[in-house]
Every structure is written in structure tokens, then in C-alpha cells.
Image: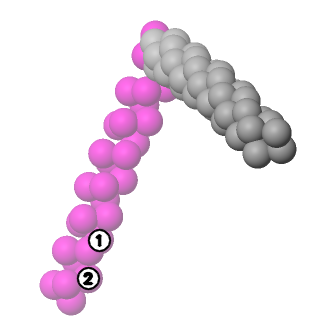
Amino acid sequence: MKNEDSKLLLGLVVGVVVGAAVTYLATTEKREQLMEEFNNLADKIKDGYHQAVAKYKEGKAEVEQGAKEVKDAITE
């Protein structure tokens, strides 16, 4: 019985903490601040992705050029 009571108490405490966190984050000011931070993070991720794609394309072009030069050298 004691084990069940401690589990119930733990469940209630966790529920209260989660409820308080949701209430805190649901306030308009905090929600707007979190959305702004999230959007900034998303922009940074997109910028990083675009930079990575650009580097990949540059590297691919260099490899293709090198392969063409080797092929031309072999066929001559």
C-alpha cells in the first residue's frame, strides 16, 4: 500500500509541475518570445543548410572538373 501511495504522490507532483510549466509557457508574452526564438533558430538552421548545399555544389563541380581533366589526359 505504501508503494502505491508514493506512486500516486509522485504522479500528483509531476502533474502539478507539468501544469505549472504549461501555464507559464502559455502566457501571451512568453509564447511570443518563444516563437520569436524558435523562428530565429529555424532561420539559422536554414542558413546553415543553404551554406552546406552551396559547399557541396562547389565540391561537386571541382570533382567533376578534375575527373574531366583526368579523362582528357588518359584519352590523349
Residue 66 vertical position relative to residue 31 in the rendered view, above or below? below
> Does residue 28 appear anywhere in the picture?
no
45 left or right of 75?
left
Q: Amino acid at mark 2?
A: Glu
Image point (19%, 74%), residue name = 6
Question: Magenta part of the protein: which range?
Answer: 1-30
Residue 3 magenta-highlighted: yes
Q: Amino acid at mark 1?
A: Leu
> Does residue 40 appear anywhere in the picture?
yes
Q: Residues within 10 Å of mark 2 (few under 14, many from 20)?
A: few
Q: Residues within 10 Å of mark 1 (few under 14, many from 20)?
A: few
Task: Quote the CA–CA distance across marks 1 and 2.
Answer: 6 Å
- Colour mode? one colour
72 left or right of 5?
right
The single residue placed furthest to the right in the displayed view is 75
- Could you say where residue 24 lies in the image, as x and y percent from the top left? 38, 27
Q: Secondary structure at mark 1?
A: helix
The residue under label 2 is 4
Image point (26%, 74%), residue name = 7
Q: Secondary structure at mark 2?
A: helix
Depth check: 54 or 40 in front? 54
Q: Main secondary structure of the magenta part?
A: helix
Residue 19 vertical position relative to residue 39 in the rendered view, above or below? below
The single residue placed furthest to the left in the displayed view is 2
**Which label sits on residue 8?**
1
Task: Report the number of numbered marks.
Answer: 2
Image point (30%, 55%), residue name = 14
Residue 62 magenta-highlighted: no
The single residue placed furthest to the front in the displayed view is 76
Residue 70 vertical position relative to residue 55 in the rendered view, above or below? below
